[in-house]
Image (spheres, rainbow, N blue to C red):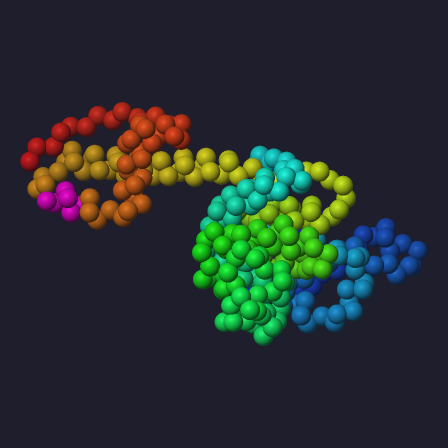
């Protein structure tokens, strides 16, 4: 079914809307009218279909297919988190949200709020502050638009939704819609591993909702991505450092020209250059400075 799903994803990426209902041949034998085992629908097509059409589909199967390309878990290392250890779950989610970065997190949490509280603007307007804060909103987080929250408050809000709100019996019915909406934002087309991180975030909430007696939940190991980011930054920094040495080897201008060149570098590039040539900083990441020979430049 994965190949079939990939075809549907490609059609959706090309701008097609559709609804597809699938049932295995052996399930329809004997002339009995059985329910479909799988259903796929783009958001626009879903709105055009009659509500009672989902009675023809096995319970919840429509929500199992969010029409997003699947990134195989076995390409990455995974870890098991103990569901009873709240601190470990909170720490993992904090790292996961940092991995996704804050701009996408703003879009994600706004989508979450719309699903959890569809009439929030009228029932719980932000303009009235704490007076109209919903009961599911964390007490230690200001009742403000997610865009206007501090980074730490925004992550606390998102953590609370995953660990407290969704597992609550009152809101379990919105879990699949919340997950489908989040993955449907297509924020990480160029960074598919981040979609895996987002899926792991929902895996934690799903495990808390299931109540099947599981004591752990399997999630993607975030440390492998941190290591790759460090390697990428250090490679870029070394390239900058090498270009700077090369320019000095062939320079014919004045010291003022060199100062202007350095001043033109952006702050992140300057920081990376410092990291790439400072053994103490590199030791933190487990790297060593590669000695490079350079011919002194005479002015």
In the image, residue 179 above or below residue 84: below
Percent position of residue 163, x then y: 63, 50
Using the rendered image of the protein, determine whether residue 4 is visible from the camera's viewpoint: no
Residue drawn at point x = 86 percent, y = 58 percent: 34
Q: Is 295 colored magenta in this rendering?
A: no
* Residue 258 among those drawn in magenta: yes
Can you see residue 33?
Answer: yes
Expressed as whole percent of the image width and height from the top left, the position of residue 179 reads: 63, 55
Q: Position of residue 83 (x, y in %)?
A: 67, 41
**Nearer to me, 59 or 247:** 59
Q: Is residue 116 above or below residue 278?
A: below
Q: What main secondary structure does the magenta stretch of the protein show?
A: helix
Pick whichever, 241 or 91, lies toward us: 91
- Where does residue 136 sit, x and y in percent of width and height? 62, 60
Q: Residue at x 55, y 42 (%)?
A: 91
Position of 127 compared to 42: left or right? left
Quadrant position of residue 183: bottom right
Residue furthest bottom as drawn: 122
**Magenta stretch, residue numbers:** 256-261
Residue 179, above or below 287? below
Residue located 45% across and 53% down the image? 151
Quick check: 20 left or right of 90? right
Residue at position x 89%, y 54% from top? 29
Q: Is residue 47 above or below residue 299?
A: below
Tell me if 62 is positioned left or right of 163 in this view. Answer: right
- Name the quarter where the C terminus is drawn: top left
């Amino acid at each position: 079914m994965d190949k079939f799903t990939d075809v549907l994803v490609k059609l959706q990426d090309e701008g097609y809307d559709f609804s597809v209902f699938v049932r295995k041949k052996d399930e329809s034998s004997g002339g009995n009218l059985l329910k479909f085992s799988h259903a796929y629908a783009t958001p626009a097509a879903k709105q055009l279909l009659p509500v009672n059409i989902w009675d023809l589909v096995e319970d919840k199967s429509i929500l199992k297919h969010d029409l997003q390309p699947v990134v195989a878990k076995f390409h990455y290392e995974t870890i098991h988190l103990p569901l009873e250890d709240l601190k470990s779950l909170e720490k993992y989610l904090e790292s996961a949200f940092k991995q996704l970065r804050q701009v996408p997190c703003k879009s994600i949490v706004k989508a979450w709020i719309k699903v959890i509280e569809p009439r929030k603007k009228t029932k719980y307007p932000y303009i009235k502050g704490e007076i109209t804060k919903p009961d599911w909103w964390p007490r230690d987080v200001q009742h403000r638009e997610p865009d206007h929250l501090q980074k730490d408050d925004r992550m606390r809000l998102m953590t609370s939704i995953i660990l407290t709100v969704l597992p609550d019996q009152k809101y379990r019915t919105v879990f699949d819609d919340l997950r489908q909406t989040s993955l449907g934002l297509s924020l990480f087309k160029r960074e598919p591993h981040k979609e895996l991180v987002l899926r792991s975030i929902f895996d934690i909430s799903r495990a808390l909702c299931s109540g099947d007696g599981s004591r752990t939940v399997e999630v993607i190991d975030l440390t492998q991505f941190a290591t790759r980011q460090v390697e990428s930054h250090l490679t870029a920094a070394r390239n900058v450092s090498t270009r700077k040495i090369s320019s000095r080897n062939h320079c014919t201008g004045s010291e003022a020209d060199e100062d202007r060149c350095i001043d033109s570098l952006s702050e992140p590039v300057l920081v990376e250059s410092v990291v790439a040539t400072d053994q103490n900083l590199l030791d933190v990441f487990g790297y060593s400075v590669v000695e490079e020979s350079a011919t002194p430049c005479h002015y």
